[in-house]
Image (cartoon, rainbow, N blue to C red):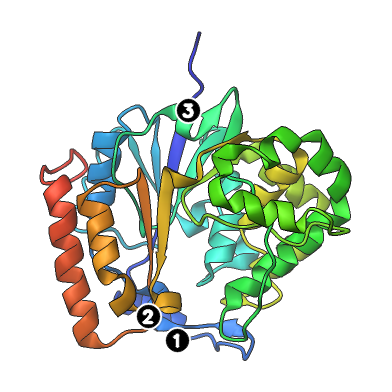
Amino acid sequence: MKREKIDFVITWVDGADPDWLKEKEKYTVQKNADGSIFRYRDFGLLKYWFRGVEKFAPWVNKIYFITWGHIPEWLDTTNPKLKIVKHEEYIPKQYLPTFSANTIENNLFRIQSLSEHFVYFNDDFFLLADVLPTDFFKDGKPLDTPALNVHCPKKSLISQYFAINDVSIINEHFDFKNSMKKNSMKWYSLRNGTKLFRTIILRHCPRFPGFWQHHLASSLCKSVMKEVWEKEYDVLNNTCLHKFRETTDVNQWLFKEWQLASGNFVVRKVNFGQSFYIDRDGIKKIHDKMISYITKQKGKIISINDGEMSEKDFENLLVDLTNAFEKILPQKSTFEK
């Protein structure tokens, strides 16, 4: 049986690039937009992403490295598995330049050579242990952990607006009760762990109240993204016209949620990986937990969500994260010069 090709896609920005900063300064951040500087901060850990992929996912077909134009000095762009893709090579001209992750992510399906099945990584998602193709796709269907959720918006948490906007579109296209009934074995699977209780509590809602997001690498289908664009062009177009993330945006969760609502997914265990949120929990609360999770390889993937912290805390975190990744990934990859 021929194995389906699976590509990895990673987006990266060098927030210290003077040319990029000069370009960014030409545009004004609107009142309802997100211009937080730490959204563009580079931890300097990218080489461990490549080391993790080479060691733990050697089966990957191609790696698409999405960039504004800057490329790390150490990256060997001649590696046959690596494809460098600049924004202008796949994002329509009317949306450029962009400083919004939503625009960059929502147009990924336009990369012509990208496989139908791909896994999207932020540059703060890292593989920590061996993964198989079936950890991301099985029988042509993406893997995910389904759970209902109630979104609690806060003015400073702009992503909560995206979550509400996303689910409002889902409810225009899918009947909540029918969707849950048709896919009950997935929604109520024990593989969902304690997140199952969220679904049980919220199952009597008249519509999808919201979706819990694991915030790990996303298994996506190009055909699904194209379908959503065809049916919701106006909202996606308006999102992509914004130079920075704005409260009226939708993000790539919309495509994941479309897959969930349609039943086009396979359940993945909730303990596949873990997300840590510096901006939500505070660096002092999660610092040691992150380091332990990496060095002890407690899951297969980790996401490290940046947030506001003192310069001293940031420097200490970088030292400890580098040491932790060096412990499990000491060997240079073929993606390094």
Which residue position is annotated with label 1? 25
Up-down relation of residue 199 to residue 55 (above or below) = below
Decide which of 89, 51 is in the foreground and name it: 51
Up-down relation of residue 97 to residue 33 (above or below) = above
How far, Cα to Cα, is label 3 from label 1? 43 Å
**In the image, 231: left or right of 150?**
right
- Residue 294 seen by the camera: yes
Using a 10 Å C-alpha cutoff, classify the residue at mark 1 as few (fewer than 14 neighbours), some (14 to 19) or many (20 or more): few
Count up the numbered dots.
3
Residue under the point 29% across and 32% down:
80
Decide which of 17, 193 is in the foreground and name it: 193
How far, Cα to Cα, is label 3 from label 2? 40 Å
Which residue position is annotated with label 2? 21
The type of residue carrying mark 2 is: Leu
Which residue position is annotated with label 3? 134
Q: Position of residue 132 (x, y in %)?
A: 40, 29
Q: Position of residue 87 (x, y in %)?
A: 49, 58
Q: Nearer the viewer, mark 3 or mark 1?
A: 3
In what element is the residue under mark 2? helix
